[in-house]
Amino acid sequence: MPQESEAVIGAEWGDEGKGKIVDYLAENADVVARFSGGDNAGHSVTAGGRELKLHLIPSGVLHPNVISVIGSEVVVNPLTLIQEIEHLREQNVDIDPARFLVDRHATLIMPWHRMRDALQEAARSGKGGKIGTTGRGIGPSYSDRTARIGLTVNDLLAGDFEQRVIDELGRQEKIVRQMQGEPLVSEIIGQLHDAGDRGELLDILERSITKQPFDKEQILADLDRARSILSPFITNTVPFVRDTVMKNGRVLFEGAQGVLLDLTHGTLPFVTSSHPGVAGITVGFGIHRDQLKRVVGVIKAFQTRVGEGPMPTEQQEKIAERLRGTGANPWDEFGTTTGRPRRVGWLDGPLTRYGASIGGATSLAVTKLDILAGMGDIPFCVGYKVGGIVYKEPPTMDVHFLNDAEPIYELQPGWEMPQGGVKTPNDIPENARRYLERVEDFVGLPVTIASFGADREATILL
Ligand code: IMP
């Protein structure tokens, strides 16, 4: 069995701080491979002294000896991708075909997917069921893939590429026209106007109800530019990644989102459309959990969620403001992709155990322990009460059950950050260590990485 490859996955609702852990582990990797999701994800990297927000390109690109891969199960918005390549090149980060590969089988996210995402959300919002998506067209592009329609990266290489795009545009216009039938869309446009909203969502919705919702010439021109920039990177990544794993190369699989947002195992419908756990690696690369040395499930010391859906331990007002921060710091809890304030709450033991287990984690990394410092005793959720019955595990991810779940908390003694921060295992405050031990015990996995701050040196191997 191969011994050297590993994965980093989010065990909660995303934004657990995976980028930081990937960045840390990428130093020893040969390959960093992104396996699921699209530009709904986001992580910040520092290049040329400037902070860049990357959505698609794995953070491995910043390590000169690492080959970065975008796999077949990723949904690729070609315009986001070329923008990121250009930004990185401006910062003198070398993006060369020997070090960056994009799978030819990945599905493309096109303007119609973003439009359908907006239309679906508009239709749902009137009925109180808005998901709160990132608006990046993720759901519609994955649905096209399962419906076996849509364009793939491969189409960018085809001789008759223009014709393929024109044919697809025709099909998609029909789909969008069917969706416009909803009188609700006009109502929502009216409401957004009344609210003085001139945002991108309003633009997309307005365009959707015109006779020609898509600008064919612009789409063709954009894709033509994308294909000239992307062509050198396009390949079949599966044999390369599989060979590297099987020959004991060090592949680091980089997760996006979190297992509680898994299409099948999350809080449907408030989920994303991919599989953020090890299942996504298997689908995208044909690599299985027993071919990995370890799978690091990343969790935060408290919990956050963006978008709608149940969150039993959610906090409001003062505690929420304290956990979230004001937005003044880059690590405050505001979405990297949408800028939305994240919902925040205490660590939910049963959901974390579920996420880590379904995702296939073999150890945990716990981030942002510094944020809990100075807050006094820390509530840790160890079960729920629903209709007078106590549950130690969520018996279902059904949203009605979780909405009704009243968390049962255990108070963990709090801690203060030591002067000079935490830079070695010896600097970890005694009660923070106890908190980690309680998490280990409850989730049933060892905590092997703990992070006490934004600096690299605040990430501690245990
Ligand atoms: P979508 O992936 O844009 O369709 O959004 C579906 C749900 O997943 C929404 O609740 C989003 O807020 C959430 N989501 C998607 N990507 C991320 C992420 O990278 N971090 C946190 N939440 C995310």
Image (tube, rainbow, N blue to C red):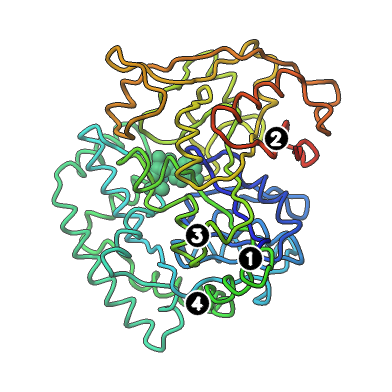
**Circle 3 sits on which residue?**
281
Residue depth check, mark 4 versus mark 1: number of the one nearer the observer = 1
- Image quadrant assignment for residue 214: bottom left
How far is the residue under mark 1 from the one under mark 3? 16 Å
Q: Is residue 22 above or below residue 349?
A: below
Label 4: element kind:
helix
Location of residue 195 in the rendering, given as x and y in whole percent from the top left corner: 33, 31
Residue type at the position of mark 3: Ile
User: Is the residue marked by circle 4 packed among few (<14), some (14-19), or many (20+) residues within 10 Å?
Assistant: many
Residue ID for mark 2: 450
Q: Are marks 4 and 1 in contact (CB under 8 Å)?
A: no
Instruction: Name above or below for residue 247 compared with residue 329.
Output: below
Return the disc, 1 or 3, that comes first in the chain's sequence: 1
Which residue shows up at 33% across the image and 65% down it? 145
Left or right, residue 206 beside residue 277: left
Three-letter amino acid code at the position of disc 1: Pro
- Residue drawn 47% across and 50% down? 276
Query: Label 3: how many residues lie within 10 Å, few (<14), some (14-19) or many (20+)?
Result: many
Q: Residue at x 48, y 67 (%)?
A: 286
Is 41 rendered above or below residue 380? below
Mark whose residue sits in front, 3 or 4? 3
Q: Secondary structure at mark 2?
A: strand
Q: Residue furthest bottom?
A: 159
**Nearer the observer, 459 or 330:** 459
Q: In which of the image's four quarters is ligand 1 placed?
A: top left
Q: Provide the secondary structure element on which disc 3 rests.
A: helix
Query: Quadrant of the rendered structure where residue 100 is?
Result: bottom right
